[in-house]
Image: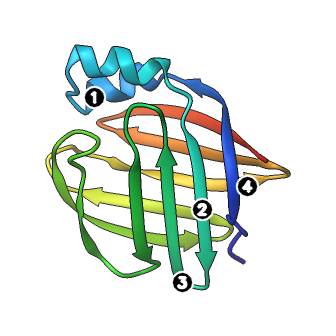
Amino acid sequence: MPADLNGYWKMISSDNFEEYLKALDVNVAIRKIATLLKPDKDISHDGDHIIIKTLSTFKNYNMDFYVGKEFEEDLSGVDDRKCMTTITWEGDKLVCVQKGEIEGRGWTHWVNGDELHLELRAAGVVCQQVFKKT
């Protein structure tokens, strides 16, 4: 059964984020700024329609999608690439596969108590982030 992702979530930890950004070939200046940020997530989840807003003082990134429907994702706010993205439920985890230049790229969101977990993957590198519901 899909998890309820609705809510506003504040980052409490991020492990291996700089290595993840290196795997995406993000330039060193942007990496240094990005690793200092603690972005929030504002998630609206209504059936198969999900909007995930990643909010920070540097850049904001919005994803608006329907579960199970492939779409072209413009990652100009992240690493200036485009990819074909499909997001599905695997049990209570929301799993994203991003097909493009970077092998093995994607992410997984799941909820554990009042925490939202995010695993980011690219080119064999894994970053773990945790957010707390406010």
Secondary structure of residue under mark 3: loop
Give the distance between the C-alpha atoms of the residues marked 4 and 2, in whole angstroms.
Answer: 12 Å
Q: Amino acid at mark 3?
A: Asp
Residue position marked by numbered label 4 in the rendering: 111
Residue position marked by numbered label 2 in the rendering: 43
Q: Amino acid at mark 2?
A: Ile
Q: Nearer the viewer, residue 78 or 134?
A: 134
Horizontal relation, residue 114 to residue 2: left or right: right
Residue 29 placement: quadrant = top left
The crowd level at tag 4 (other Cα within 10 Å; few <14, some 14-19, many 20+) is: many
Residue found at x 54% / y 83%: 48
Give the distance between the C-alpha atoms of the residues marked 3 and 4, in whole angstroms.
Answer: 17 Å
Residue found at x 69% / y 66%: 6
* In the depicted structure, whether residue 114 falls above or below residue 23: below
The x and y percentages for residue 15 are 56, 23
Numbered disc in front, either 4 or 2: 2
The crowd level at tag 1 (other Cα within 10 Å; few <14, some 14-19, many 20+) is: some
Disc 2 to disc 1: CB gap under 8 Å: no
Secondary structure of residue under mark 1: helix
Give the distance between the C-alpha atoms of the residues marked 1 and 4, in whole angstroms.
Answer: 26 Å
Residue found at x 16% / y 55%: 82
Pointer 2 or 1: first along the chain: 1
Give the distance between the C-alpha atoms of the residues marked 2 and 1, in whole angstroms.
Answer: 26 Å
The x and y percentages for residue 31 are 32, 20
Horizontal relation, residue 50 to residue 59: left or right: right
Give the distance between the C-alpha atoms of the residues marked 1 and 3, in whole angstroms.
Answer: 30 Å
Residue position marked by numbered label 1 in the rendering: 23
Residue position marked by numbered label 3 in the rendering: 48
Q: Amino acid at mark 4?
A: Val
Pointer 1 or 3: first along the chain: 1
